[in-house]
Image (cartoon, helix red, strand yellow):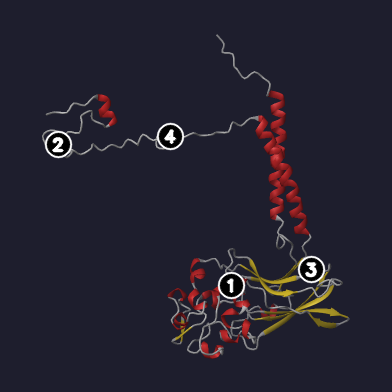
Amino acid sequence: MAVNYSAKEEVDGHPSGGGGGVAGGGAVGGGGAVKTRKPDNTAFKQQRLPAWQPILTAGTVLPAFFVIGLIFIPIGIGIFVTSNNIREYEIDYTGTEPSSPCNKCLNVSWDSTPPCTCTIDFTLEHSFESNVFMYYGLSNFYQNHRRYVKSRDDSQLNGDNSSLLNPSKECEPYRTNEDKPIAPCGAIANSMFNDTLELYRIDNDTRIPITLIKKGIAWWTDKNVKFRNPSGDTNNLTALFQGTTKPVNWPKPVYMLDSEPDNNGFINEDFIVWMRTAALPTFRKLYRLIERKNNLQPTLQAGKYSLDITYNYPVHSFDGRKRMILSTISWMGGKNPFLGIAYITVGSICFFLGVVLLIIHHKYGNRNTSADIPN
């Protein structure tokens, strides 16, 4: 018996028959429902859900522009003034200039013996009142390269004994050396910054050393969670790292980075700071802290200073540059005028647009918007 379909039913894809199959053994099995691509008749699929759409009028747009401008401009001025109040002094000691005291160290190599040293004298025009942060800066050094970033073994750095003797293949070609596993392995660790910086204040031709604090420069989570020394029956790091060798470019093994046990091995803070890779080719990393001793005297008085540098880190081969930066900080971090300028710019643009739209609305807002169609 044939089943009759109406034209509407063919379009909708639903037969009027009560469920009989197609006669003569058609493509659809007996008793099966006819497939359709029509969405279900629900409010969501048929797009009948209640919706709200704002109507932009002069009464809502103009106040929004003025409010944004009046909020952003004072915030931007405050951030910009705060950034400018941060003291910062920078010294480039790469030594590319013939007159530089460090020019003699320009072509130093990783294994230069004895190490090259140089001294740079400078003058601070203004005192540094609060705690001072000493950074080292590198330029044209691409720590964000994909293979460089992956060249490490986090399990080994976390103190896993099996990874200590069998590092990840991601560390190649700095995985093994002379048939011994490298600890720490990888290109990041192998290229660790190893210049030594010492600061002196010159008072009546007398060099007074400035105390540089080497602890507290790494993130707490890195120091206490991500980086750990291998575990064993002894606290002797020499025994715990037995069977491993130092990175190719290092002058000494990892268990001799510091004389203090809580700052040696994988938990050495200079090493931890270096292992946190930078996103841009020009970057700075925290090197030392200079704490303020009392509130009566500034941390660094205005006057003459000298910087003694043990020049170990070669950068001339890749046209890099090295810097030493002294800086204070504020509630918003280090010196960065961009954020304040951005707030001022956005606030000024919004306020200007608000004024322009207000003039346009005042001049043309009351005009009859209906257009007369000529005959």
Distance from disc 4 to disc 3, alpha carbons, whole Å, reads: 61 Å
The numbered disc on residue 47 is 4
Spot occupied by residue 305 in the image (x, y as percentages of width and height): 81, 76
On the picture, is 78 further left or further right than 242? right
**Total marks placed:** 4
Query: Rounded to the nearest whole Å, what is the CA distance between mark 3 and mark 2?
Result: 89 Å
- Which of pointers 4 and 3 lies earlier in the amino acid sequence? 4
The image quadrant where one finds the C terminus is top right
Disc 3 residue type?
A: Ser
Please name the residue that numbered disc 2 is placed on.
26
Residue 244: % across, % down: 49, 86
Disc 1: CA contacts within 10 A as few (<14), some (14-19) or many (>=20): some
Residue 128 in percent (x, y) is at: 80, 69
Quadrant of the rendered image containing residue 336: bottom right
Q: Earlier in the sequence, mark 3 or mark 1?
A: 3
Of callouts 2 and 1, which one flags the residue occurring earlier in the amino acid sequence? 2
The part of the image, by quadrant, that contains residue 115 is bottom right
Front residue (pair 153, 161)? 161
Can residue 317 be seen at all in this image of the molecule?
A: no
Where residue 95 sits in the image (x, y, percent)?
69, 75
In depth, the one of 344 and 35 nearer the eye is 35
Image quarter (top left, top right, bottom left or bottom right) of the N terminus: top left
Q: Secondary structure at mark 2?
A: loop
Quick check: marks 4 and 1 in contact, CB under 8 Å? no
Name the residue at 56% across, 88% down: 235
Residue type at tag 1: Asp
Amino acid type indicated by mark 2: Gly
Q: Residues within 10 Å of mark 2 (few under 14, many from 20)?
A: few
Tell whether label 1 touches label 3 (CB within 8 Å). Answer: no
Q: Which residue is mark 3?
A: 130
Residue occupying the point 57% across, 86% down: 255
Residue at which label 1 appears: 222
